[in-house]
Image: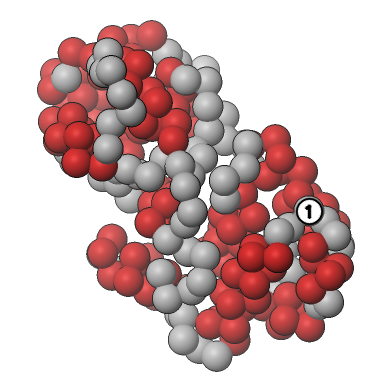
Amino acid sequence: MASPTVSESRALKHLTGADPVMAALIGRYESPAAVRARRGRRPGDAYGALVRSIVGQQLSATAARSIYERLIALFADRTPTPRELLESDPDTLRAVGLSRAKVAYLRDLAEHIEDGELDLERLAELPDDEVFAQLVQVKGLGRWSVDMFLMFHLGRPDVLPVGDLGIRRAVQAEYDLAELPDAAELERIADPWRPHRSLACLYLWRSRDSTPVSAGSD
């Protein structure tokens, strides 16, 4: 099992000292690398990550993986380029299991890239709020999808996906809440985790044996 990096060790020390509930979670589960690996392989490029995110919205990890694999199988087992998506018959894309809405979202992403309205290469240089402002111009990319992109593609350390159902359920269980926390309650509980909320969320997902799933429409 991989040991935590120096920066992860500092983050774990902070979380352990800041919140006894989080300290118990960290003591209960494996290293951050092992927790992160549970998500499986994802595209390494920004465009591929966004395509995969749209495909997986509001689906279980198993269903999302199956549909994504059928999609890339249409394109020699690789992410279709924006031009290929735009030139593909929408019915062919729907046949792999994509909803009509998700086909429209993928095409809108492709159009933004083809038209030069979305410069994916520049996103890594922008602060979180500006990445959000850029990405939500694409239909189907909302708060949850952007949070996943920030956390898992750009590696931003202090993201709290308040719209994630797994996080809300985990916080309800671990903090013994009567109801699922809303966004404001989640922000309040997570405030001591700053600036390491992304890592805290990995352990919350692990506590429910779950992967990220949007709690509603994105």
| Residue nearest the observer in this picture, 89 or 70 | 89
The image position of residue 200, as x and y in percent, is: 31, 30
Q: Is residue 192 left or right of residue 183?
A: left
Which residue does the numbered mark 1 point to in the structure image?
97
| Residue nearest the observer in this picture, 161 or 45 | 161
* Coloring basis for residues: secondary structure
Residue found 20% across the figure and 34% down from its top: 185
Q: Is residue 128 left or right of residue 136?
A: left
| Residue 164 falls in image quadrant | top left
Residue 130's place in the image compared with 86, above or below, is: above
Q: Is residue 82 left or right of residue 16?
A: right
Residue found 81% across the figure and 77% down from its top: 88
| Residue 43 falls in image quadrant | bottom right
Q: Is residue 162 left or right of residue 118?
A: left
Q: Is residue 173 visible?
A: yes
Residue 34's place in the image compared with 153, above or below, is: above
Q: Please tell me whether mark 1 sits on a helix, a strand or a loop.
A: loop
Residue found 52% across the figure and 65% down from its top: 140
